[in-house]
Amino acid sequence: MTEVGWAIISTGRHPEARMAPAINKARNSRLVAVMSRDLERARAFAARHGAPRAYDSLEAVLSDPDVQAVYIASPNYLHAEQTLAAVQAGKHVLVEKPMALTVEDGRRMVAAARQAGAKLGVAFHCRHHPAHREAREVVRSGALGETVYATASWSALALGPRPEWWSKPEQVGGGAIMGTGVHVLDLLRFVLGREVVEVFAYQDSPPIELTDSILLKFDDGSTAHVVCSRKVAYPNNDLNVYGTAGRIRSVDTISTDLKGSLEVTTAAGITVRSFEVDDPPRAMYVGLVEDFARAVLEGCEPAATGEDGLKVIELTLAVFESNRTGRAVPVGRA
């Protein structure tokens, strides 16, 4: 097998604008099927993106022998049950964030995939921005010296219609933190290569908050400040890392589009790199798809595993617990 046959679960805006085109552009992938509860909607989506089959049930998708991998972009509360069904049917799964709404469900997903021999990945696309990958290598090289602290933000002014389930806490799990904050939390783990041991957080209006301000403590004693908001008109969606011997400024790179610049300052001098690609809205997603398909074809691990998704669930629950209690919360005990 030289390419992976994909099925997309959901015909929402994100699969429409990014993931379906990304699967079609990926060198090792092809779009085989689309599923929506509305069969006519699935057929229309499939026609627009060249998928030969459309389904209105998960069971039908999982019975298709040409489907090796399933991309799950359904409402958050369905991620766990659909992932469990898919891996038990022998399919590999790339699931949208948040991977699940509880640690228990996340653990069940990881265990089920492992038992089935299926690959389980989480769609943390920010890991595929070259600025973030280069920043990770700079940190790992020791060029910054000892990491002291970092800052990261992904905010926007959220206007326009939203899916109905976004207003239901039991279905969405949260507000800004579930929309963009989970990406930032994962990105800091990815770039810094450290685990968070404690969280202190403030949220403006839980359970579906519009702004989160989060302080993280890592296992090496360094800290990070994270902000995510749906109320900011002109945000700085940047990643900054400060060390005893250098600094990283990744400017306007935390986004759905591949753009921005990376500035690295060390004793050796300052290097600046800007990022321009042919298809900014889809470039990171092509990388995401190709990476997961490679994991399926070669038996390696995807860039963001189920275990990575589980870590982020623990962090988000600690954020809610810290806001509720007004105290710092050890991660994994929320």
Image (cartoon, grey):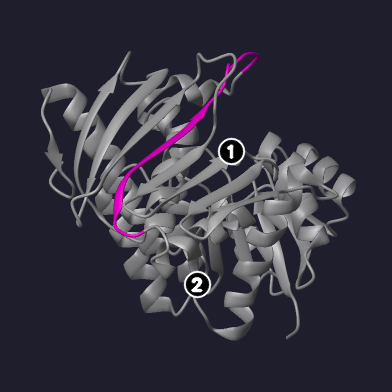
The C terminus, quarter of image: top left
Q: Residue at coordinates 60% horizontally, 85% vertically from top-left?
A: 298
In the picture provided, is 139 more to the left or to the right than 102?
right
Q: Residue at coordinates 38% horizontally, 75% vertically from top-left?
A: 114
Q: Amino acid at mark 2?
A: Lys
* Observer able to see residue 49: yes
Q: Residues within 10 Å of mark 1 (few under 14, many from 20)?
A: some
Picture quadrant where residue 324 is located:
top left
Taking the magenta stretch, the answer to whether it contains residue 160 is yes
Relative vertical location of residue 66 with respect to residue 125 in this rendering, above or below: below
Q: Residue at coordinates 24% horizontally, 28% vertically from top-left?
A: 201
Magenta extent: 145-161
Q: Which mark is residue 307?
A: none
- The x and y percentages for residue 34 are 73, 52
Q: Which mark is residue 251?
A: 1
Relative vertical location of residue 298 with respect to residue 330 in this rendering, above or below: below
Asked whether 121 or 90 is in front, the reply is 121
- The x and y percentages for residue 32 are 77, 63
Q: Residues within 10 Å of mark 2 (few under 14, many from 20)?
A: many
Picture quadrant where residue 318 is located:
top left
Asked whether 232 or 236 is in front, the reply is 236
Spatial separation of the CA atoms under disc 1 and disc 2: 33 Å
What residue is shown with label 2?
119
Label 1 SS: strand
Picture quadrant where residue 226 is located:
top left
Asked whether 132 or 114 is in front, the reply is 132
In the picture provided, is 332 more to the left or to the right than 177?
left
